[in-house]
Image: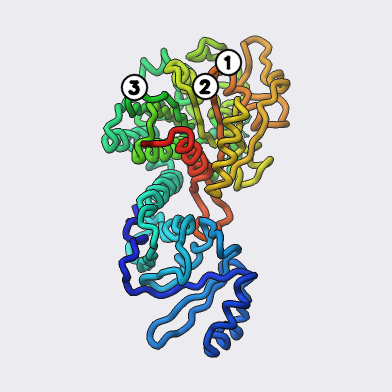
Amino acid sequence: MTDFASLLVADRGQKARLIHLVDKDSFDPWLKKRPAEDRALIDAHRFDGKKGFAFVLLPRGNAFEVVSAVKNATELSPWCLAKLAESLPEGTYKLASGEPGKAALGWLLAQHRFDDYRSKGEDAQHGARVLITGEAARIDETVRLAEATALVRDMVNTPAADLGPAEIAQAVKAEANRSGGKFKVISGDELASGYPLIAAVGAAATPERAPRLIELEWGETKHPRIAIVGKGVCFDSGGLDLKPASGMRIMKKDMGGAAHALAVARLITMERLPVRLHLLIPAVENAVSGSAYRPGDIVKSRKGLFVEIDNTDAEGRLVLADALAKAVEGKPELIIDFATLTGAARVALGPDLPATFANRDELAAELEAAARDVEDPLWRMPLWDPYDDLLKSDIADFANASSSPMAGCITAAMFLKRFVPDEIAWAHLDTWAWRDPAKPGRPKGGDALGLRAVFEALKRRYPSG
Ligand code: BES
Ligand code: ZN
Ligand code: ZN
């Protein structure tokens, strides 16, 4: 893991190269005050202060300063320094005026690399770009957010062959050891009898990659209980309803919900939010073999409802259903789940916006406000009761998928809703956990989407100290 703490350091008057940030309003007045050599160079580069992420190096003897265009120089976005952090020569830098604020996060994440699978020497080692900040009190928090985001990216990027249910359990155990939480894994006969849907989806996997429910409990009993649930499908082949090659290509990312849930748990425990946390991750591989569950099978869920399997590729909602049922038994006041649940959510909202469902307007508003403030966007979608009919089964209580391709992310959410009683506040994020194409500070591949928004909302709901 990148040593983020070494890349953002408190201002003690260290020597640093200055970075001037300008926007379309401040550029002209700023330029007027520059020496003639700067103006000539800036002109030669056709730098006009308007094109975001463009920058010019201004020589100062053997050293240099930097001028970079940002959208709004008075209100920095998390990503406005990312291009610089990716591109500048190694060294120590400082903003010429103001503090990095939110932009420190992008400075850090732009320097994170997932290079576990690059043979040595091939990927030239990038020197560190260190940013000096006058906001020493914010350093730890920013570093923690960068680490949590990097955790999601790395877990999602790790090939399915190297990250199965056992490895997810290992990652949760490491978190339990670090935080002093209680760790538990349910598998084998106990899983088959207590969590039939999780067992059914994972039935085709090899014994080493057997399905399991992974749990972590943390915090004092006097604090309000909350549950965080994450879809941990380590590879989604579709099962017997096999995906086509194009649809299967990035399905190593189908444990992205679990990665988000673990990252939120990590942030909660590290900031010691006054909650009693219950993390639940149903971890399975949706594989194909003679023991695979089949279309037309009917499984009695943990909650006692009979689910007819219409499509083995709608497996995420099945494993989540049993995990949500278990979460509900703990009587939490809030449940939040993350899942790479449907392609339909991506069709509806594209790559950037997790489709967010909530059974309370207040909870949706809290998430939307937090998302806006930390610039980790999400978009609310409706839990539209009439679409419940789309999950009708001829012979069971209901089916896991609809015969209509319409409103796929809503029907998936409606399926989950059957497992959460109305008395419990619940939000469901149908997230992509992936980035394509790349953006500054956010390479193509695994990414956290909705993680910072949810954590910010939790921090506001449960302020510490
Ligand atoms: N893991 C997929 C959803 C997915 C697909 C997320 C592509 C992101 C990108 C999920 O298990 C799935 O296959 N869902 C099906 C549901 C359908 C069979 C009702 C889908 O979305 O097509
Ligand atoms: Zn699927
Ligand atoms: Zn899936």
Between label 1 and label 3, give the one nearer the viewer.
Answer: 3
Whether residues under marks 3 and 2 lie with C-beta atoms below 8 angstroms apart, the answer is: no
Percent across and percent down for residue 298 are 56, 14
In the image, what residue type sits under mark 1?
Val
Q: Amino acid at mark 2?
A: Ala
Q: Secondary structure at mark 1?
A: strand
Ligand 1 lies in quarter:
top right
Q: How far from the left and from the top, in percent, is residue 350? A: 65, 46
> Which residue position holds label 3?
221
Marks 1/2: CA–CA distance:
10 Å
Determine whether 449 is above or below 206 in the image: below
Discs 1/2, front:
2
Answer whether residue 416 is visible to the viewer in this image.
yes
Q: x and y percent of residue 440 in the render?
A: 53, 60
Of tags 3 and 2, the one toward the viewer is 3
Q: Mark 1 packing: few (<14 Cα in 10 Å), some, or many (20+)?
A: many
Residue at image location 60% in from the left, 72% down from the top: 26
- Name the N-terminal-most of marks 3 and 2: 3
Front residue of this view, candidates 378 and 194: 378
- Could you tell me which residue is drawn at 48 percent across and 33 percent down? 461
Q: Which residue is mark 1?
A: 307
Label 2 belongs to which residue?
A: 321
Q: State the residue in front, 236 or 325.
A: 325
Left or right for 13, reference 454: left
For badge 3, the amino acid type reads Thr
First in sequence: mark 1 vs mark 3: 3
Instruction: Check disc 2: other Cα within 10 Å, few if <14, some if 14-19, many if 20+.
Output: many
Establish if 445 lies above or below 277.
below
Q: Nearer the viewer, residue 40 or 126?
A: 40
